[in-house]
Image (cartoon, rainbow, N blue to C red):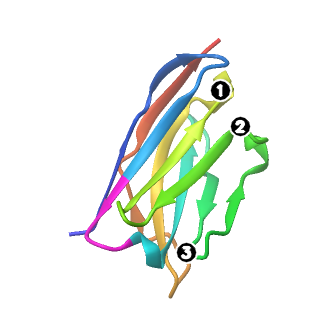
Amino acid sequence: QVQLVESGGGSVQAGGSLRLSCAASGFTISHYIMAWYRQAPGKERENVAESSWSTMITYAPFVRGRFTISRDNARNTVDLEMTNLTPDDTAVYFCAAAPRESLEYEYWGQGTQVTVGS
């Protein structure tokens, strides 16, 4: 059974930091692009960061050097370290996985809430 389980969300004040973690089971992330997405109330889901099996990493422009995505293929996990958070970062954050065969995100976690106070 394929599963992605996020953890680490919570409430912080502006300027604070959070570390999100995504634990994968039922498949091996080393063959997948792993990504973090987010969805704020009333807005569409947007990509935050991606880490490919070849260690290529991309970030959305709004990250501006504040977030770091990292993957541990041995532990089958992918993390998102977020620093200097602002209220605009308030959203539900989702972990997603795309196989190299399709490059489409087929697996999604249930999401974890991040709330940043002003």
Left/right of residue 67 with respect to residue 19 in the rendered view: right
Would you say the residues marked 2 and 1 are in contact, meaning their CB atoms lie under 8 Å apart?
Answer: yes
- Magenta extent: 23-28
* Label 2: element kind: loop
Left/right of residue 82 with respect to residue 114 in the rendered view: right
Left/right of residue 26 with respect to residue 47 in the rendered view: left
- Residue 94 spot, x, y in % from top left: 46, 49
Residue 66's label in the rendered image is: 2
Would you say the residues marked 1 and 3 are in contact, meaning their CB atoms lie under 8 Å apart?
Answer: no
Q: Is residue 26 magenta?
A: yes
Q: Quadrant of residue 107?
A: bottom left
**Front one among 99 and 45:** 99
Q: Quadrant of residue 109?
A: bottom left
Check disc 3 and report the residue beneath it. 53
- Please rate how many residues cluster around mark 3, counting C-alpha atoms within 10 Å: few if below 14, some from 14 to 19, many from 20: some
Check disc 1 and report the residue beneath it. 85
Q: Amino acid at mark 2?
A: Arg
First along the sequence among labels 1 and 3 = 3
* Label 1: element kind: loop
x 56%, y 40%: residue? 81
Q: Is residue 17 above or below residue 14?
A: below
- Cα–Cα gap, marks 2 and 1: 8 Å
First along the sequence among labels 2 and 1 = 2
Q: Amino acid at mark 1?
A: Leu
- Residue 58 spot, x, y in % from top left: 70, 60
